[in-house]
Amino acid sequence: MAQRETIRRARKDAAEGKAPTTQAGEFVREEIEHIRRGKHGARSAKQAIAIGLSKARRAGVKLPPPDPSRTSKSTRRRAERDTQAAKHPHKPASKRSRATKAVLKRESRQAGSHQALSRQARNAASSRRQTARSSAARKAAKTRKSRRGGR
């Protein structure tokens, strides 16, 4: 279950007309914080991001379905279930929830490190086309410029 503050920030992003991925970023950020503070661990940065996206879908963020060419059938099915869960919210089974938490507690906290996240970002970027990468960089430079007061 996502924290109230995270849901509030995501809803604020939605009200400002920001993209669903930006809204979902709030949940991913929360998950990374949980790992860094030692609430639990994760196998990898990729898993931490996946947990955050799952929480976002369950909270009602209208994320697009995962790309079929890059994800397994079970991942796509899980994303579909998470989206459905947002429409009919209910508490997860306490036994399952406890078991999942216990497993995550045994995992390393290394997944939340700057190095792990940097490696994940680099790997994710390398699978995208050059044009997509350069346009993302151009957009980042433009928004960075506007945030600094036009300098």
Image (cartoon, helix red, strand yellow):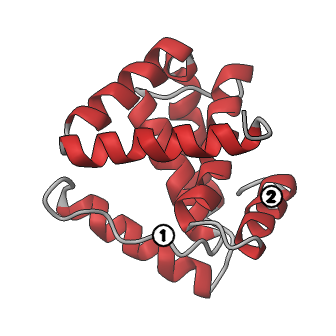
Disc 1 marks which residue? Answer: 63
Q: Which amino acid does label 2 sit on?
A: Arg
Does residue 76 appear left or right of residue 37 in this picture?
Answer: left
Residue 148: image location, x then y, percent? 76, 35
Q: Earlier in the sequence, mark 2 or mark 1?
A: 2
Does residue 98 appear left or right of residue 74 in this picture?
Answer: right
In this view, the residue in front, 147 or 30, is 147
Residue 82: image location, x then y, percent? 49, 71
Disc 2 marks which residue? Answer: 9
In this view, the residue in front, 19 or 146, is 146
Above or below for 57 versus 108: below
Instruction: Tell me the residue at 39%/30% (across/down).
Output: 121
Disc 1 crowd rating (10 Å Cα; few below 14, some 14-19, many 20+) is some
Above or below for 86 versus 141: below
Does residue 150 appear left or right of residue 134 in this picture?
Answer: right
- Helix, strand or loop under label 1: loop
| Rendered-image quadrant of the C terminus | top right
